[in-house]
Image (tube, rainbow, N blue to C red):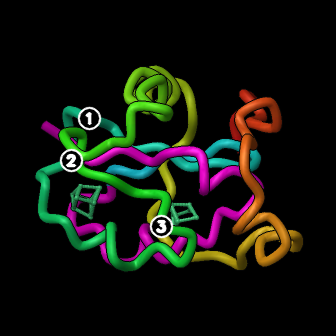
Amino acid sequence: MAFVVAEPCIKCKYTDCVEVCPVNCFYEGKNFLVIHPDECIDCGSCEPACPAQAIFPEADLPSKWAEYKQLNAEYSTQWPNITEKKQALPEADTFKNVKDKRPLLDPEPA
Ligand code: SF4
Ligand code: F3S
């Protein structure tokens, strides 16, 4: 099992999750972060740290966001590693509670 970043992260990217991860297993796209499922040690530290409540243990991933398991696995092999917290995206607070953000996910690496 691993933890998974789901839709609420899109266009927010607060990066508080990065700061608490003991194994640096977050990878960065332009407006979304993912977790490498083979590197995550299931410590659970990132889940409560995310202001957008975007992170779930795989077993608790809401079914409407099931696709994000695959997206994390895929993009974590294509995007650069991120190991330090940075400023959230400028529109983060606006997009935190916006629904149906999947079409806004930018597939490009950071
Ligand atoms: Fe990192 Fe722990 Fe979150 Fe896995 S559960 S991504 S190891 S902070
Ligand atoms: Fe995204 Fe939450 Fe981390 S918004 S960057 S998963 S703190």
Ligand 2 within 8 angstroms of badge 3 C-beta: yes
Residue type, numbered disc 3: Gln
Q: Was residue 39 drawn as part of the magenta stretch in this picture?
A: no
Query: Magenta span covers which residues?
Result: 1-24
Where residue 64 sits: x, y (%)?
Answer: 49, 32
76, 97: nearer the viewer:
97
Residue 53's label in the rendered image is 3
Where residue 26 sits: x, y (%)?
Answer: 42, 51
Q: Secondary structure at mark 2?
A: loop
Residue receiving disc 1: 37
Q: Earlier in the sequence, mark 3 or mark 2?
A: 2
Residue receiving disc 2: 40
Q: Secondary structure at mark 3?
A: loop
Cβ–Cβ under 8 Å for marks 2 and 1? yes
Please name the residue shown 21% across and 47% down the image: 40
Ligand 1 within 8 angstroms of badge 2 C-beta: yes
The quadrant where ligand 1 appears is bottom left
Looking at the rendering, which quadrant does residue 101 occupy?
Answer: top right
Please name the residue shown 23% across and 50% down the image: 57
Q: Is residue 55 left or right of residue 80?
A: left
Q: Does 11 sit above or below residue 35?
A: below
